[in-house]
Image (spheres, rainbow, N blue to C red):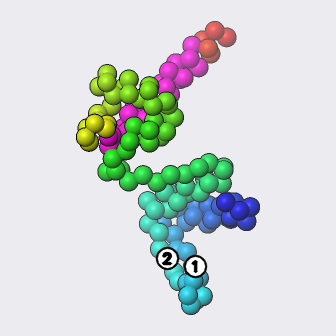
Amino acid sequence: MSDEQTLRCPQLRRILASQKAGEAKLHIPDPKTRKPVEITLTPAMSDLFLELLRHIGSGDTVTFVPIQQMLTTQQAADLLNMSRPYLITLIEKGDIPHSMVGRHRRLKAEDVFAYKAARDKIRSNAMDELIADGSDQY
């Protein structure tokens, strides 16, 4: 991404955030006619774009995965930020559902994201407990 594009992310985020309560209306030039076209974003679309722009503005890599897509074990491991062998261990323990396509394991993206959400919640609760335990000592 160019520096110019990175600089535009905060500007677009401010525009979307200022209209967050209702539908955001953007005026974007049509590439062919160069005339402005009004695009209306629902609050849900605005939230999605705000989250996307937050990541892009921070320099994060962003990948879109359709929720019904079937993933390879390597793709799932990459999304979960773990090694493929560790993911296979979780699959074999039954922690993450999978199906076989020939002799290859495939995972639904929605199952991978559900596992990630549950794992993140457990981690967050554990961190909250550590913080609470630490504050009790003072």
Foreground residue, 37 or 16? 37
Q: Secondary structure at mark 2?
A: strand
Foreground residue, 6 or 107? 107
Give me the residue at 51% from left, 34% from top: 81
Which percent across, then down, holds residue 127? Answer: 54, 23
Give me the residue at 50% from left, 31% from top: 82
- Contact? badges 2 and 1 (CB < 8 Å): yes
Residue behind mark 2: 39
Give me the residue at 58% from left, 60% from top: 17
Residue type (three-letter) at the residue carrying disc 1 = Ile
First in residue order: circle 2 vs circle 1: 1
Q: Magenta stretch containing residue 132, yes or no?
A: yes
- Distance, label 2 to label 1, CA atoms, is 7 Å
Q: Which mark is residue 10?
A: none
Looking at the image, which residue sits at the far right? 3
Q: Which residues are magenta?
A: 106-133
Which percent across, then down, holds residue 134? Answer: 61, 14
Q: Is residue 127 left or right of residue 100?
A: right
Which percent across, then down, holds residue 10? Answer: 67, 60
Q: Secondary structure at mark 1?
A: strand
Which percent across, then down, holds residue 72? Answer: 38, 42
Residue behind mark 1: 28
Up the image or down, 110 lies above or below 88; here it is below
Is any atom of residue 120 visible in this view? no
Is any atom of residue 9 visible in this view? yes
Foreground residue, 14 or 103? 103
Q: Is residue 82 left or right of residue 114?
A: right
